[in-house]
Image (cartoon, rainbow, N blue to C red):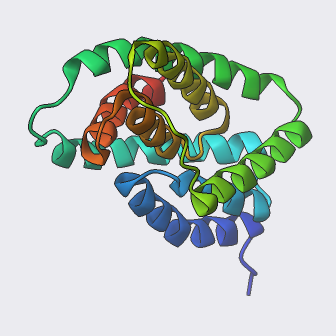
Amino acid sequence: MELPRMSDIVFLLMIPIAALAGFVTSIAGGGGILFVTSAIALGLPSLNALALNRITDIGVLTGCFNNFRKVKDIPWRSIKIFTPLFLIGAIAGASFSVSIPDSTLQFILIAASILAMSLVIVKPQPKVTAGRKFFLVGYFCIFLIGFWDGAIAMAGTTFFIIAAHYFFKMDYMKARVVNMFVAIPETLI
């Protein structure tokens, strides 16, 4: 009797992890932290873990789109402004990730996971009031979150929702819808 190959075992272990990560991501983002760190822990190279996470994100976006498109008063103006900022940031971030050694990328991914989880636990409450001067800072943050999402592919949705709330006074549902539309071209590319 032949023993199962390690790649088969990893594949079988990743199925429930991917399902749980997809569920978390579809609600508020952050499932990539679970998926990418689990894939790395199971021995996948960092870039492969990121690529797999991106492929699963296509499924998440498809599922989310069906439900979130029903939201009334979709802020199309914000989508038009945020999409190029997010996309340019994501392309630069992805270029960065593929250009560094795997050991460096793995270190960055683990550090980013710890940072993202600590921000969720600590729940920072910056005192930002929406105003014209903060819009420019907010736009720059959207670009940086695009870079983060392209390079690290973990918790980008979570950070996007936080930035949209603090800098543009969007409630959760509007921020999530805007992020979903903005993330479509970025995820596909």
The total number of labels drawn is 0
Q: Quadrant of the N terminus?
A: bottom right
- Residue 33 in percent (x, y) is at 62, 55
Residue found at x 80% / y 49%:
111
Q: State the residue at coordinates (30%, 20%).
A: 78
The foreground one among 30 and 13 is: 30
**Who's the residue at 80% across and 60% down the image?**
43
Residue 49 in view, yes or no:
yes
Rendered view: 3 above or below 86: below
Q: Is residue 48 left or right of residue 134?
A: right
The residue at 69%/43% (across/down) is: 48
Give percent across and percent down for residue 121.
61, 63
Near-viewer residue (144 or 41): 144
Q: On the picture, is 94 further left or further right than 101?
A: left
Q: Residue furthest bottom?
A: 1
The quadrant in which residue 95 appears is: top right
Q: Nearer the viewer, residue 94 or 78?
A: 78
Q: Nearer the viewer, residue 176 or 19?
A: 176
